Amino acid sequence: MVATGLSEVPRLSALMTRGIQNGVEGPRMMEGHEATTLEPELQCFIKALWSPSSGIVDSHSLMLSLVGEAESHGTTFSYNTTVIGGHIEGNQIQIHVFESNVIASWNGSSELDSELILIPKVVVNSAGLSAPAIAKRMKGLPDCIIPASHYACGCYFTLSNTKSPFKHLIYPIPEVGGLGVHVSLDLNGQIKFGLDVEWIKGIDDIPSFLNMYSH
């Protein structure tokens, strides 16, 4: 992670402290010339934060591993299932779910039959971008406790047909709403530049940046 000005050095130090507190092994502050020794194509005139234990993983394999570990501890995954709503009754949340393939073919002209009602002890709404919409389907849940949605979108650009000029992940100081435009490598050594941030109105909006390209 690179500081591009003296004003960013305190933030770089704070990120190193946070990393150590979170158990990251071996992070240390580097002078600019040390960073450019590691990455000759990098311009770093101030300081950089070096984390030798950070890197990339095969995200799909990681997810499969976590699924296997969860199932070995008694977790049941219900795939092909859609939360269509729910309500609060007393101090419990009742969740109404249905088979996703039935929802996909439903024309809305009749009521859905045979929905399943779950009464869990704890509900974790981890529906990503759809989490606010899921929360709004829960009758009796006050609107004031549902966070407002703010959507941002960005683009990556791939450097192809050439040898990567970098061997490490390179990040700027994080910006509001994102990590800043950074250099990342995949498991095959393919390099990407991104992700920029553009705030958009809705989940289905197309960023204005993409309108300049055929996609």
Image (cartoon, rainbow, N blue to C red):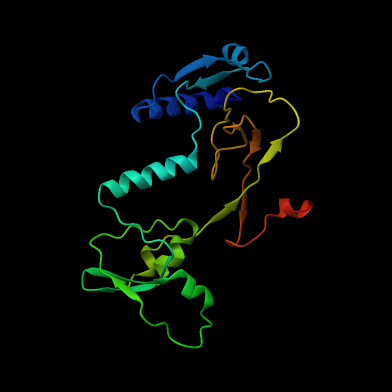
**Residue 35 appears in the picture as rendered:** yes
Say if residue 139 shows up in the picture: no
The picture places residue 177, in percent across and down from the top left corner, at 54, 45
Whole-percent x, y for residue 168 in the image: 58, 24
Left or right position of 186 against 77: right
Residue 19 placement: quadrant: top left
The residue at 59%/62% (across/down) is: 202
Q: Which quadrant is home to the C terminus?
A: bottom right
In the rendered structure, the answer to whether residue 87 lies left or right of residue 137 reads left
Q: Where is residue 176, by image quadrant? A: top right
Of 12 and 139, the residue lying toward us:
139
Question: Which residue is located at x 62 percent, y 36 percent?
Answer: 181
Residue at 52% of width from left, 15% of height from top? 30
Q: Using the image as rendered, state which of residue 161 and residue 38 is in the foreground.
A: 161
Residue found at x 49% / y 26%: 12
Give residue 121's position: percent from left, percent from top.
Answer: 22, 62
- Whether 213 is drawn above or below 29: the answer is below
200 to the left or right of 52: right
- Relative horizontal placement of residue 215, taking residue 29 as reference (left or right): right
Q: Is residue 44 above or below residue 11?
A: above
Query: Where, by quadrant of the figure, is residue 208 drawn?
Result: bottom right
Residue positioned most to the bottom: 110
Query: Which one is nearer the viewer's eye here, 62 or 138?
Result: 62
- The number of numbered discs placed on residues in the rendered structure image is 0
Quarter holding the N terminus?
top right
Q: Position of residue 42 (x, y in %)?
A: 66, 20
